[in-house]
Amino acid sequence: MKLTAIAGVVAGVVSFIPQSTLALPQDVNEAEVNQQETVMETITVVAHRQPRQLSEVAGTVSIISEEDLQRNLVINAADLVRYQPGVDLDDDNSRFGNSGFRIRGIGGNRTAVVIDQVPVADHFSVGSYSNTGRGLLELGLASRVEILRGPASTMYGSKALGGVVAVHLLDAQDVLRDGKRGSRLQGGLHSDSHRANITGATAFADGGTSLLLAGALQYGEDVRSADLSAEKRDAQHRRQQAILLRAATDTQFGEWQFTLDALNESRDTDIQSIIGSGRLAATTSLIGDDSRQQHRLLGELDMAPLGWVDRGSWRIYYQASEIEQDSFEQRMLLPEPLDIERLFDFEQVTAGVGADLESDAYIAGTRHRIGYGFELASSTLEDQRDAAQTNLTTGVTTKTLLGETFPLRDFPRSRVTELGIYIHDEFQLWNDGPVVSPGLRYEHYRLRTQDDALFAERYPNSEVTDLTHDAWLPKLGVIWSVTDNSEWFAQYARGYRAPPFSDVNIGLYYPQFNVLAIANPDLKAERGYAFETGFRGRDTDSSWSLTAYHNRYSEFIQSRASLGFDPVRQLLIFQSINREKVVIEGIEGNWEQRWNSSWSTAITAEYSRGEDRESGRDIADVAPPRVIAELQYQSSTWDTRLIATAVRGQRELFDESDAPLFSTPGYATIDWLSSWYLNDDLNVTVGLFNLTDRKYWRNARVSGLSENDPSLPVLAEAGRSIGFAAYYRF
């Protein structure tokens, strides 16, 4: 489909509803306001891309507020989801950092991460020396985080197959104290990886104009895994910086807001865990020097009511990220020792525009809340690997390693264009009856390769292909109030993930080993079908929920799968292919109870299981059952919490050749966190973690590794540790 025609569809979505049907009587608006004043609930934005009370969402959403960030000593992404059932951090190495979040067993690029509604850059990796990670340094400047579980492609398009993690950065209203100015400082330390951070922000306002300036610094080392000797550590030093500038002004059209944020990270790693084993048997030294730079420009309009549009926002953005990774390796155990240097560069530049609008309407005597919008984004992607090998005996240097001649690319320079147009509605079938929320999205994905002399020179026999995919993504939610403060909900949603650029066109040719990877023009998009239902309720002293889900995924993409030996080309052929059905299902529940003015408890639990229906094997990425229990004492000036986490051991796991994989053993840990509110402007939090000094592994760090993988010891979690943080406003 031509983009000009698609643009016409966008305009049609905004204007298809007659203006005469969208006039909502003022008494209905006033009734809604009065209801919200009576029942105070947490407001979420991620589910409908518009503000909603949690009780109005036919799904499962977690809200991590600014207070939660402080009380839980959140410094990095792992801290963020420490006590979140069904959510883990993908962090399967000791060098490159995390690759995103895993929600109900689905992670990587299959789970969307958005910062102020702007998607973060893609994750890409190849081999053992190249892995872009996902950054997420913005957490030092976050005011709140929302997590939507399960396929959310109807609202967020491709890459939301597993769910959405939405990070909201600070704005001036979070910092202002008297309406005109305000500042804040916070700093923290944690012994689990000798990390420290400091964040500062100041804001000014005059009339309808405001300005925010903020910055964050972090330093950290490698995780002090329990029972790991110093000589076996992958010693690391990482430095992270982030700045945020945000200006806003009120106009007759609404509030305009302009944002600039920039990130920088560097990691120096001395890898010890894997040298001397496998293909690194002759390696005596492996040093990684990695960096990441990213900046984003964002313009937003939180619009005033206009015509039939009662509320909504527009945004336009530009985001650029660049990753450079250098590896320095020495193989001194060979008869002729070698010095090897590798360089990996990855760059992604994205420009996009989007809108999320909402109209109140009476249609056929029934009140409707109609949401609609679009997202159009274009990304250019480019990688390059370079290498040089020097024979320390002869002094000869070559740029051909294992049959590969450098520099080279793993895929041709590519441009990806994505357009999504969505509409959803919310209306009550009858008085006191269920509220139904149907939705539909049209998603258009286009991958185009660009002229690339380097790729063509290195892989003259590789066929590259362009790709176009279109999809219709429906959802249907139902909420039925059982009492004034409880409801039953259910939803069906369809997920979608377009074939990634790196799987469609692959550059891989090892003539020394007769290995060739080929493109797959017939690669299908991954699809998900989610069914979820549950009950939840709340009153002044308690809240509870119980949710069951059944998610089916088809056409899962397996990268660089072996197709066997081709007798015509006399080569071992690899190609990314689609796999058949995967099913993940489970139950999540939570209960919070305040017993009196001082004591309260909270319990969350999850049980999930995943199966590859083609092979019958359990899915390694699905976390084992977990229970988190909290006991809290609170007074006017301080509170203290004991938090126990118990995880069952994982089932026996096997790879496609029936070789055993590492199955995480069961464990239980206890954390103790206390906060002191010294005055209205200063509070301090101290946490003692893993009090029993238990050695354990999180499933998300080790899933898919063999049971004898040499990196397992450094991927264990930290032993007993202490954290401290102070927060000051002035």
Image: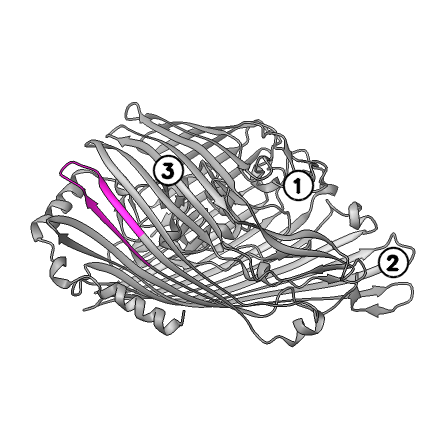
The residue stretch that appears in magenta: 422-439
- Would you name the residue on which mark 2 appears? 337
Q: Earlier in the sequence, mark 2 or mark 3?
A: 2
Q: What residue type is disc 1 on?
A: Glu
Bin the neighbour count of mark 3 within 10 Å (Cα to Cα): few under 14, some 14-19, many 20 and up. many
Secondary structure of the residue carrying tag 2 is loop
Residue positioned 51% across, 64% down in the render = 294
Secondary structure of the residue carrying tag 1 is loop
The disc at residue 656 is 1
* Extreme residue toward the front, this view: 568
Percent position of residue 60, x then y: 36, 40
Residue 541 visible in rendering: yes
Going by the image, does 339 lie left or right of 24?
Answer: right
Of residues 629 and 659, the one nearer the viewer is 659
The residue mark sitting in front, 1 or 3, is 1
- Would you name the residue on which mark 3 appears? 532
Q: What residue type is disc 2 on?
A: Pro
Do tag 2 and tag 1 residues touch (Cβ < 8 Å)? no
Secondary structure of the residue carrying tag 3 is strand
Bin the neighbour count of mark 1 within 10 Å (Cα to Cα): few under 14, some 14-19, many 20 and up. few
Q: Quadrant of residue 444?
A: bottom left
Q: What residue type is disc 3 on?
A: Glu
Q: Is residue 584 above or below residue 494?
A: above
Q: Quadrant of residue 395?
A: bottom right
Is 436 included in the stretch rendered in magenta?
yes
Residue 73 visible in rendering: no
Q: Is residue 515 above or below residue 84?
A: below
Q: Earlier in the sequence, mark 2 or mark 1?
A: 2
Q: Could you tell me how far apart the alpha carbons at marks 2 and 3 are, in whole angstroms?
A: 59 Å
Percent position of residue 668, x then y: 54, 27
